Amino acid sequence: MHTLDVALGERSYPIHIGRGLLDDPSLILARLKTPRVAIVTNDRVGPLYRERVQRGLEANGVRVTAVVLPDGEAYKDWQTLNLIFDTLLAERCERSTMLIALGGGVVGDMAGFAAATYQRGMPFMQIPTTLLAQVDSSVGGKTAINHPLGKNMIGAFYQPRLVIADTATLDTLPDRELKAGIAEVIKYGLIRDLDFFVWLEGNLERLLERNPAAIAYAIERSCRNKAEVVAADETEQGERALLNLGHTFGHAIETGLGYGEWLHGEAVAAGTVMAARLSHALGWLGEKDLERAVALFRRAGLPVSGPALGAERYLELMAHDKKVEAGRMRLVLLKAIGRAVVSDTATPEQIAAAIEACCP
Amino acid sequence: MHTLDVALGERSYPIHIGRGLLDDPSLILARLKTPRVAIVTNDRVGPLYRERVQRGLEANGVRVTAVVLPDGEAYKDWQTLNLIFDTLLAERCERSTMLIALGGGVVGDMAGFAAATYQRGMPFMQIPTTLLAQVDSSVGGKTAINHPLGKNMIGAFYQPRLVIADTATLDTLPDRELKAGIAEVIKYGLIRDLDFFVWLEGNLERLLERNPAAIAYAIERSCRNKAEVVAADETEQGERALLNLGHTFGHAIETGLGYGEWLHGEAVAAGTVMAARLSHALGWLGEKDLERAVALFRRAGLPVSGPALGAERYLELMAHDKKVEAGRMRLVLLKAIGRAVVSDTATPEQIAAAIEACCP
């Protein structure tokens, strides 16, 4: 087991990474103030892992309430969030009850937001079971639900007390989701870690084959990058925005097609290619770096072009993004592989041209 | 104008108290980072004051979006909260837009929760227009909506950047609401300010007659008490819980009758009498102090007994309260006038007896 720390003063917490950690209730037990837990999961992950976690806790005298949500980004909404509150209240969960998010990014975002707002805040833990959640969404305290007009529009910054990434849970992950997770792994290389990008170029096939050592290394290195950025800028006043490379374009794809059509990682891959093309058009990212970035996404089986929504629709959707400030669109762009910047210099025409270049 | 500070480090903010402050946009303008504001109000307060605030801002180049909610505690729910989000998104309000809550406690609680969660947090200000909101709910950062199973169950601690209490807005306040606000004023005397309680005994009629000097003094002294408690314990780990004197009983009344039937302050008055009777039964609060407390509520025209829901139903509703810990009901009780404590020593039988003694 490897352990990293997210250094946030009194809100610091560890990330444990290893195979089979789900079978060790002591990691969770050590952080409980009262013997009371609510597990939030979904109807795909729940049947695979919930009983193991629950039994381990119950064997140690913990009373466990389970909330099983329908699976999918399409359910990341008010109605489904209310299912969590209804159960927490009906089962008399208290402000001191520990909420555990067991599942992928959608479960983590929703359960985290429920924890942030139930009785004005209850403690929570993340047990991510997808690659995307293990390398990105479970770390850093961003929680949210979607609104019909924009992704992750309603939410809170709320840090977990603990993250447990059991790499064995990835054994059952569908290929498509594994690849979607790799999109966020590549992202760390592109924005701030050239050495990691080079490592990925040399080890991508091992990741796709789910080589345990390669997977564990990719998760650990991704989490270390994420933890450093979050520790430096918890609420995204500056550097943390770089983690949104490809996300403004990507959210437009997700919202434009309807939530759940594309996986988040797929939209981020296509969105990152758009951002890279725009960076190249601005004269920032060299031709060769652009090609390396596109080639790596392609080798990972990820989309390198977006759906043909029309550039105008993209711009309209992007204008709702949280990164808009004083009406200017602030985008994460690349100066080189391993060096990202936030910039509002691109004109709508330049942005539209980059989108057109990436749509069939 | 009097100004008090709520000392919370980098989240500190001022409370301005005075007559006619609504006509001075400079107080608001000084705190805007971008010239963009969303005013959230309701259909009773909005027609009285919104235009004055809005015109003053627009005359200074600020773009203002207005959200007008239906009036009343019955609307403090998800559906109405979503009306705020719908408008903020449709009008492209940004993460840097300033949200202004203009109204009573319900508007402040809902608008504050919307601000806490829109794009994971936008800045907000409180312009309370009821006595209850001016002396209590607008200060301290508690925001929430109700759930059918419990009051204020979903919410966040989220501090405003500024509170403006224009005492002239109380001129239009219905008598019933003025009295409801006085319940929270009396609360400060009971929990921590004997001198203020004595002042209230000598000046209650002046408050009921809306004597401007008396009203201003009561608001200022109440806010000073609240600011001190909040500064010492922002997220209610300890002392802040004392501010909930009468609230566990009171919330049971509000939830049990259906939100909006009794005003919050009315339920707090009856709930405080129950807490005082229980304190007396435990041998803590002397007979004379009990009588003084009941007499002051009665002189204010506030209820000193609760609706006849039956003690069992009260206990069931109270068990949902946020103050429950490890299944024990933690209640705010009185050792004397001016000295409150949090205690879980009362048995269900003792609590039930105090409720019965206060129900017709």
Image: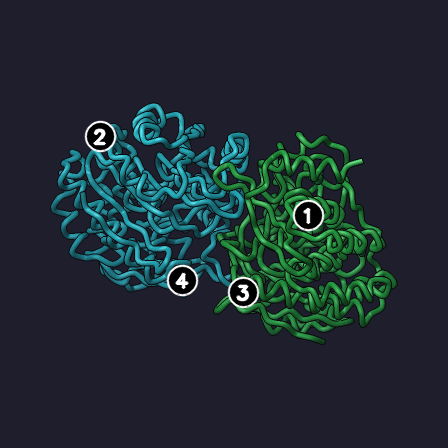
Chain colours: A green, B cyan
> What residue do we see at 72% from left, 56% from top?
A132
Q: CA distance from mark 4 to mark 1?
A: 71 Å
Q: Position of residue B187 (x, y in %)?
A: 27, 50
Name which of mark 2 and mark 4 comes first in the sequence: 2
Same chain, marks 3 and 4? no
* Residue A301 against residue A36 in the figure, above or below: above
Q: Are marks 2 and 3 in contact (CB under 8 Å)?
A: no
Viewer can see residue A61: no
From the viewer's perspective, is the residue at label 3 or at label 1 nearer? 1
Q: Earlier in the sequence, mark 3 or mark 1?
A: 3
Q: Which mark is residue B30?
A: none
What distance separates the C-alpha of mark 1 from that of mark 2? Answer: 63 Å
Q: CA distance from mark 2 to mark 4?
A: 42 Å
Which residue was labeled with disc 3? A231
- The three-letter code of the residue at mark 3 reads Ala
Chain bearing tag 2 is B
Q: Which residue is mark 4?
A: B346
Whether labels 2 and 4 belong to a single chain: the reply is yes
Front one among A331 and B78: A331
Q: Quadrant of residue A18?
A: bottom right
Q: Residue at x 62, y 61 (%)?
A: A139
Which amino acid type is shown beneath numbered disc 4? Ala
**Chain under label 1?**
A
**Marks 3/1: CA distance?**
30 Å
Quarter of the image with the N terminus of chain A in it: bottom right
**Amino acid type, label 2:** Asp
Q: Is the residue marked by circle 1 packed among few (<14), some (14-19), or many (20+) residues within 10 Å?
A: many
Q: Which mark is residue A280?
A: 1
For marks 2 and 3, give the one nearer the viewer: 3
The amino acid pointed to by label 1 is: His
| Nearer-the-camera pick, B317 or B184 | B184
